[in-house]
Image (spheres, grey):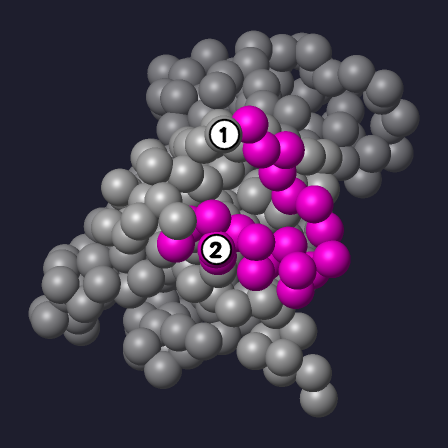
Amino acid sequence: MVTLRRSLPPLNALIVFEAAARHGNLTAAGAELCIAASAVSRHVANLERDTGLALFVRSGNRLELTAAGRRLAEAVATGMGHVRDVLAEIKRRAAVQTLTIGCSYDIAHSWLMPRFRSIAELVVDRQLRVITSDTYENFDALDVDLSVRYGDGKWPGFAAVHLFAEECFPICSPALLARHPELRDASVDILLKFPLLQLTTDDWSGLKWADWLRELGAELPVVKGPMFANYSLLLLELAAGRGLAMGFAHIVDQLLADGQVARLSDRSIRSGLGMYAVYREADSEQIQPVVRLLAAAHDAGAAKVRG
């Protein structure tokens, strides 16, 4: 096995080289590192000898990077910078003891926050932080301990625990259904007489109105209707009785139980995808209790709604 120690030049030489490359001056690099300019020159010369590369073009104390030197300087800065950031994050977590959960705004509002108190009671030794984003790449950050994501459960480098499957059906306000009882188990022709409320985001790959209409036998390339930036805004328009929406099981269950929205069909459509609790496998021991709580809280909540 080729170890890092055997395959890399001495780390102190790389660190001195990075400082010299950044300053372009032996004296300035030496001042930063608290060593003499001659020592900087010696480290750089040793590195060039070890690598067999010309890293600088010298003009007195002034240094100009060669093409090879520029690539190596970027690599050293990136690699050492990553080590620095990881160490800083480890120290920050040790000092602050924060547990950060990431999810979309809609999941936070409709699903996570009703469970927040239970999580807080479980992790009394840490400060809870919730962040929201519709771009899952933001949840790959080192300071995010756990995220709730939509997908197939496959995120490279992360463990994923299934929380619930995606299931959809049409909904509207109880008042609108009372005025238009024909909406119950409505055909495509009847549904299209009403505004079909939709989400604007291009990133949303979940089930849509087109999927429901296709289930009824219609092939519509474009579904027209009012569009909203998030599901919470869409539900406000729905509650006002100004349109129909696709209801997502487990997201609108409590609204259904409270009589705030009405389901228009006992049928559902499913995508085979769902919501997952996602975390780094290296953090499994610390995160698993929260994941188990979320899964158990979801099952208990779903059973309560069904009951």
Residue corresponding to mark 1:
60
The residue carrying pointer 2 sits among few (fewer than 14), some (14 to 19) or many (20 or more) residues within 10 Å by Cα, namely: some
Residue positioned 36% across, 44% down in the render? 37
Q: Position of residue 219 (x, y in %)?
A: 89, 26
Three-letter amino acid code of the residue under disc 2:
Arg
On the image, which quarter does residue 188 sit in? Answer: top right
Q: Can the viewer see residue 140 in this picture?
A: no
The quadrant of the image that shows the C terminus is bottom left
Q: Position of residue 245 (x, y in %)?
A: 55, 27
Please give the range of residues in magenta.
39-59
From the viewer's perspective, tell me whether residue 182 is left or right of residue 272. left
Residue positioned 26% across, 41% down in the render? 31
Magenta segment, principal secondary structure? Answer: helix
Q: Which mark is residue 42?
A: 2
Q: Which mark is residue 287?
A: none
Q: Does the CB distance between marks 2 and 1 fall below 8 Å?
A: no
Residue 46, compared with residue 247, is above or below; it is: below
Q: Is residue 17 magenta?
A: no
Q: Is residue 43 magenta?
A: yes
Q: Tell me the SS state at disc 2.
A: helix
Three-letter amino acid code of the residue under disc 1:
Gly
Residue positioned 31% across, 77% down in the render? 286
Label 2, label 1: how far apart the Cα atoms are:
14 Å
